[in-house]
Image (cartoon, helix red, strand yellow):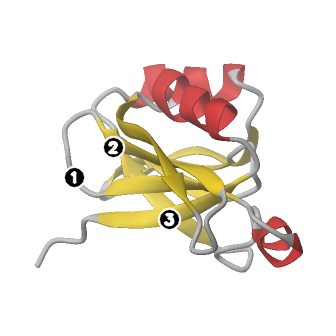
Amino acid sequence: MPLELCSLIVDDYDSAIDFFTRVLGFELAEDSPSLTTDGRPKRWVVVRPADGGPGLVLARADGPEQVAAIGRQFAGRVGLFLRVPDFDSTFDRVIESGCELVRPPRSESYGRVCVFRDPWGNLWDLLG
């Protein structure tokens, strides 16, 4: 049973699509009009790593509780782990995008790794 999707709360669909596609190299898998459970318009936005695998539903925060959860979905821990074929190129794009580098690159037995904070405050391991 492969994990298909995971939701990530963001404040804006278009800026999130831009970050994930331009900076992290994801592909926009779907961007369709949809409705909230009470009938208000929203979008169903899914991005996936270019080589496949589980996707992220980019869920625009709806209401104060969800707004408060932006960047706090993992309670201050690294909650997202992205293995990339070209660590240096991806690392450069992450830094150029203005993301905060939380832990600089280092070499471990499983490869190179650094920790960065995305534009919404979530911590990521970038692995190469």
Residue at 55% over, 69% down? 79
Residue 7 bears which disc, if any?
A: 3
Hey, what amino acid is under mark 2?
Arg
Distance from Cα at disc 1 to Cα at disc 2: 7 Å
Circle 1/circle 2 CB separation < 8 Å: yes
Q: Which residue is mark 1?
A: 53
* Local secondary structure at mark 2: strand
Q: Is residue 23 left or right of residue 28?
A: right
Distance from Cα at disc 3 to Cα at disc 1: 14 Å
Around disc 3, counting alpha carbons within 10 Å, would you say few (fewer than 14), some (14 to 19), or many (20 or more)? some
Q: Which residue is mark 2?
A: 48
* Local secondary structure at mark 3: strand
- In the foreground, 89 or 29: 29
Give the vertical position of 65 relative to 16 (above or below): below
Q: Give the mark, 3 or 1, whose residue is nearer the N terminus.
A: 3
Is the C terminus in the top left, top right, bottom left or bottom right quadrant? Answer: top left
Q: Give the mark, 2 or 3, whose residue is nearer the N terminus.
A: 3
- In the foreground, 48 or 84: 48
Nearer mark to the viewer, of 3 and 1? 3
Q: Is residue 108 left or right of residue 80?
A: left
Around disc 2, counting alpha carbons within 10 Å, would you say few (fewer than 14), some (14 to 19), or many (20 or more)? many
Is the N terminus in the top left, top right, bottom left or bottom right quadrant? Answer: bottom left
Residue at 58% over, 21% down? 93
Distance from Cα at disc 2 to Cα at disc 3: 12 Å
- In the foreground, 74 or 66: 66
